[in-house]
Structure formats: structure tokens, C-alpha cells
Amino acid sequence: MLAKVVYAGSHDSFPRAAQTLQALAEVDVSAQRVRRATIDVGAERVAQSETAADAYQALPLPSRQESPVAQVPQVACVQMDGGRIQIRDRQQEPASNLEGEKGRFWRESKVGCLLSMSSSEWTCDPCPTIPATFVDAARMSQISREIKGFSASAPSGEQGQTEQPPAVDDRLHRPLPLVKSVVATRGDIHVFGRRLIAAAYERGFNAAQRKAFVADGAAANWTVWRKHFSHYTPILDFTHAICYVYAAARVGRNAAEGWQDYCRWAQWTWAGQVERVIEALRLRQQQLGPPRQDDPPNSAAQVVADTLRYLTNQQTRMHYDQYRRRGLPITSSYIESTIKQINRRVKGSEKFWAQGAEPLLQLAADHLSQTKQLDRFWKQRPETLTGVRCYHTTG
């Protein structure tokens, strides 16, 4: 019964969870009891995650590269990104500078996705031509709106192009995802990194022959990679890279000229020839001049300068032709969809969290994992109980 209560409380608001239990399980559990049970069990799972992280850190370095399980994945992929959550805490933690989120309560959660995959290796690039998805005007307009930071409206004259139906993604030979597990926390990148590498070790990822760490260009992502996953191949998410290229090609130009340059630059990026894109951007920057301090963020000079800096900084993580030959993933679509699923429970203009945020994020991650972590937890939990009743104060 406790497992049912916790399941309901970790999937919906506590009042609605109480209603669901009444309707489906025919039990009368108050919203307050649902909240307490969910937070308590979530806290137990957080403690287990921290214990696993401590155990991994205590291992000697050679042992960390071994697998504690018999089955080592053919391809091990780790992806990470940030979610959004509102925290109302007496500690007055400073608000994060989050794009698109207004208000002093918004903070960032950190989410990691661990995927075992199956793929083949190739002697040459199995897909040398950029897929139609990324050179379809309607689809690229949609993608650029969905990716944070690329919500500018289309230039005049492009509306005719974007009325076409979006192309079908024709990428073949992509790695096939097999089993997913999820890590989520409100802790800082050091807490998150410890838990993420411990979770990867538990699944035998460190012993895989082919390993990939895929993320966007945020500095925190690559801090985690350098500290914990430096033996994984670092890959900049192709979708974020192509959105920068798309923005720089279009800005300050007519639709036909901008689209022609974009298609050429996009093919170079897909082929891992990012140095050609960087050279073209430098020529464009010479024509526009450097951005001035009073230029708006969407000015042509500023957008080109931002893209040039982004691609230059990430150039060593953009050898996409090599990654495809090795059968590695090049997009972080799995972590993007995972964050959306977690946000359904924890994010909302009317949802505020304090001490309950961390346990709930842990449970949300557990429910999205396909490794049956919660099944093992409930099976082993009776052995860990002390028999001492935990009392809660009112108020």
C-alpha cells in the first residue's frame, strides 16, 4: 500500500494523488499523508544514492574502470542537462539566471540520462549527407523555437518556405537505445557528478569499449565531463550546434541568401568540417564589425559573434563524421525528453518546493528508469527497517 501511495504522490500533486487512490485503490489517504510518505521514501532513496556515490569514490582508480555486472553495454552513452524548478527556501538561495523564466524563485535542477545502446562501426561515414530534417525550412524553424535561446521570429520572406510540411528524419544507422536510467538532483554539479558517475559504474558503463558523453555547450556540463567522464568521448549536441549555425546564417539577411549559406554551413558542420564554418563566420564578422555594447542580443553582429565564439570553444567536440563511424550518438534528444517528463511533476507556476524537492526529483528519476531500481528498493526495504516508529510533528 505504501508503494501505491508513493507512486501516486510522485506522479501527481498530492491532493490529486489522494483522489486517485480513493478512486482506484478505494483507500482514504489524506493529501498530507501522501506528501509525508512520498517525501520520506524519496529521502531514503536519496540516502541510497549518496551511499553509492561514496562507495564509488572509495574505490581504487583501476577498479573504477571495471564492471560490477556481467553484461557490459556495447555502447555506453551519458547525457546531462538542466531542468527548472521553483524553490521557496528560508536560506534565500540566489536565483539562477534562467532564460525564459521570470521570478525570483526559479532554480535549476540537474538531470542525467544513462543509455546502453547497440550500434555498428563503419569504415567510412554511413551518412555523409546531412539529413533532410536539418535542411527543411519548416522543421528548422520549429527546432530553433524549441531550443532555448533561438526564439527569434523568421525574417521577412521566409513564411512561404515554412508553410511546407516538415521532412521526415531520414537518419539511418543511428545507435539503438536499449535500457535507460535517470539521475536527478537539486544539488550542485559536484553532488550531481558524483551520483552520475556512480550510476554509470553500477551499470558497467566505464568498462565499455565505446563510451560517449553528449551535452550542449553549457560550462557545467563539461566540468562534470572533465572531473568524472574524461575517458568518455565528448560530443557536443548536434542540434544545439546547428541552431547556432542557423541563427548566424539568417540574421540580417534576406531569406534566400541566408538559407543558401545555412545549407552550406550545415553540411560542413554535419561532415565535421567546423573549421570551414568558423572561417566563413570570421569573414562575416569582418563585414559586420564587432558588436557594440548597446547592440541588442539579436543584432546581426552580436549573433555572429556569439556563434563564432560557441563553435570555436566547442570545436574539439564536433567531429561528427568520426562519431558516426564509431556508432556513437550525436544528439542529446533523450535527455531533452527526459527533462520534459520530470518537469511535468515538479515544474509549474503554482508549484513551489523546499525540503521536498530533492526526494521528489529522486523518485521521478527512479520511475523513468528502466533498470527496476524501485522494485529492488521495495524488495529490500523490509530488511533495512529498524522497527522504530518515526513520528511527525504537526504544523
Image (cartoon, rainbow, N blue to C red):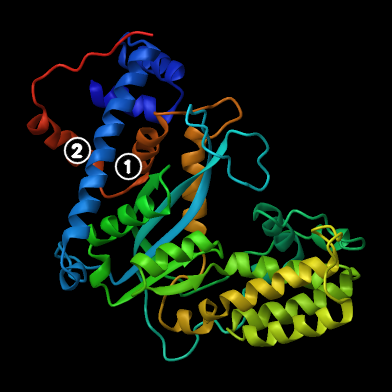
Q: Quadrant of residue 393?
A: top left
Image coordinates of residue 308 in percent, x first then y, are 70, 75
Asked whether residue 6 appears in the rendered view, the answer is yes
- Per the image, the residue denoted by label 2 is 377
**Residue assigned mark 1:** 366
Closer to the camera, 95 or 307?
Answer: 95
Q: Residue at x 49, y 55 (%)?
A: 81
Is 90 rendered above or below residue 128? above
Q: Is residue 147 above or below residue 211?
A: above
| Along the line of sight, the residue nearer the viewer: 21 or 14 | 14
Q: Secondary structure at mark 1?
A: helix
Which residue does the image show at 24% across and 59% down from the upper left? Answer: 203
Q: Are marks 1 and 2 in contact (CB under 8 Å)?
A: yes
Quick one: label 1 or label 2, which is nearer the N terminus?
1
State the quadrant of the N terminus.
Answer: top left
Q: What kind of residue is marked 1?
A: Asp
Q: Residue at x 18, y 41 (%)?
A: 376
